[in-house]
Image (tube, rainbow, N blue to C red):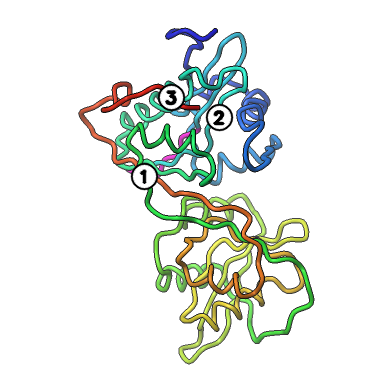
Amino acid sequence: MPTPDRPRLVPAATLDHAALTALFNLGFSGYLVPMYMSEDRLREHIAVNDIELDRSIVAVDTEPVGFALLARRGSAAWIGGMGIAPSHRRTGLGARVLRATLDAARAAGVGDVWLEVLEGNQPAIALYEMLGFERVRHLSIWSLGPEPRAVVEHRTLDVDAAQAWIAAHRAGREPWQRADPSLVRMRERGEPITAVAVPGADSIAAAAICKPDAGTVRILQLAGLNRAAARAVLLAAAGELTLRLANIPSDDMSSGVLRRLGASLSATQHEMRLALSAGRSAESPPGAAAEPQ
């Protein structure tokens, strides 16, 4: 049985990559949406999203039983995954691990910490809100199945040009995994990133940055001047493949377009934010209660 001093908390960097991968999958066992990481996919996740293993925290009993991964970009941070082994859930360990991770973020000069959580994961939401996280917006995960589609006028676009155009026309802040620094990391790793655009009166009416992935096309970033342009660039990007878009704000124009195209809503998430207070340790948050997970 866990005690206040057990399991012990150590930096994630103390685990080798195979052990960290096994812990990630153990922590997400029984999750609302099945999730599995291969060692290669976890390496990609860590590299692309700027996860800092020396500031991420793992809990070790006789073996690793919990973790929280911390990504950092300047004064902003993101929880890039958190999980507890089934044998140690509902013991308060999740709160210990996350508080230690938040303290590591504060020590690094972080001001805001972000995360996403599935809407149906009430124990995790309760934990995050207990620690001071606030809901910012709803995010949707969409999938549009493969089918023959009408050909729309479009052209390939240099990825730098597409990213600059999208940055100038996006409706709001991109979630962490689709933010500009993540795309830079993907390209540094040589991952296959492409871009398409549909024409408009001012040369471009919509643009999308895409990543082909085993018969699917993942939309990494997208912006359009209107719904018709957004629809056209989505169809151009998809071709006859399955189209996937993760963490699109539910009130974003493209969410409505996808719904009308018959796309499936795979999941919805809350995006949450914690403004860290420089003078208070996360070990003693106001209104602390027993951890519900």
Marks 1/2: CA distance? 18 Å
Q: Quadrant of residue 5?
A: top left
Q: Which mark is residue 291?
A: 3
Name the amino acid, label 1: Arg
Marks 1/3: CA distance? 19 Å
In this view of the protein, which residue sits in the foreground, 240 or 255?
A: 255
Of pointers 3 and 2, the one earlier in the residue sequence: 2
Mark 2 crowdedness (10 Å alpha carbons): few <14, some 14-19, many ≥20:
many
In reply to whether residue 164 is colored magenta, the answer given is no
Q: Residue at x 41, y 35 (%)?
A: 128
Query: Label 2's element?
Result: strand
Q: What is the span of residues highlighted in magenta in the rendered image?
A: 69-75
**Residue 1 location, x and y as percent?**
55, 7
Marks 1/2 in contact by CB < 8 Å: the verdict is: no
Q: From the image, tell me which residue sits under label 1.
A: 273
Marks 3/2: CA distance? 13 Å
Q: From the image, tell me which residue sits under label 2.
A: 83
**Residue 270 location, x and y as percent?**
46, 49
Name the amino acid, label 3: Glu
Q: Residue at x 47, y 70 (%)?
A: 166
Image depth: mark 1 or mark 3 in front: 3
Overall secondary structure of the magenta section: strand
In this view of the protein, which residue sits in the foreground, 40 or 276?
A: 276
Image depth: mark 3 or mark 2 in front: 3
